[in-house]
Image (cartoon, rainbow, N blue to C red):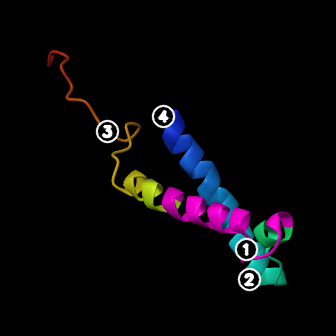
Amino acid sequence: MNGFQRTALVLTIIGAINWGLIGFFQFDLVASLFGGQDAVLSRIVYGLVGIAGLINLGLLFKPNREYETEPDTRPVR
């Protein structure tokens, strides 16, 4: 995972936490930090989180190296 993907993942996690706060407590952290849902900074953050989510869709289809097996090249006895 490169730095670009890690940044996208962090933004996606921030978005998930914000949605959790909205769902459980009706509290929008991004809006409260940046001046409401209609504020320019809030809209930028919402947009970046959305783009980060789209970028992270690629992680769903990326093979996991930990589970890939290499052929056994040892001689048979």
Q: Residue 6: image x %, image y %?
A: 56, 42
Q: Is residue 76 above or below residue 49?
A: above
Relative placement, left or right, of 58 versus 56 is left
Pick whichever, 42 or 30, lies toward us.
42
Verify whether residue 48 appears in magenta: yes
Name the residue beneath numbered marker 4. 2
Q: Amino acid at mark 3?
A: Glu
The dominant secondary structure in magenta is helix
Calculate the distance from the C-alpha at mark 3 to the C-alpha at mark 4. 20 Å
Q: Name the secondary structure under disc 2.
A: helix
Residue occupying image coordinates x 25% and y 30%: 70
Q: Residue 7: image x %, image y %?
A: 58, 44
Of mark 3 and mark 4, the one earlier in the sequence is: 4
Q: Residue 60: image x %, image y %?
A: 39, 57
Name the residue beneath numbered marker 3. 68
Residue occupying image coordinates x 74% and y 71%: 39
Q: Amino acid at mark 1?
A: Gly
Calculate the distance from the C-alpha at mark 1 to the C-alpha at mark 4. 27 Å
Q: Is residue 25 above or below residue 52?
A: below
Give the residues in magenta: 33-52
Name the residue beneath numbered marker 2. 23
Q: Residue 27: image x %, image y %?
A: 83, 78
Q: Amino acid at mark 4?
A: Asn
Binning the other alpha carbons within 10 Å of mark 3 as few (below 14), some (14 to 19) or many (20 upward) gives few
Of mark 1 and mark 3, the one earlier in the sequence is: 1
Q: Are marks 2 and 3 in contact (CB under 8 Å)?
A: no
Calculate the distance from the C-alpha at mark 2 to the C-alpha at mark 3. 38 Å
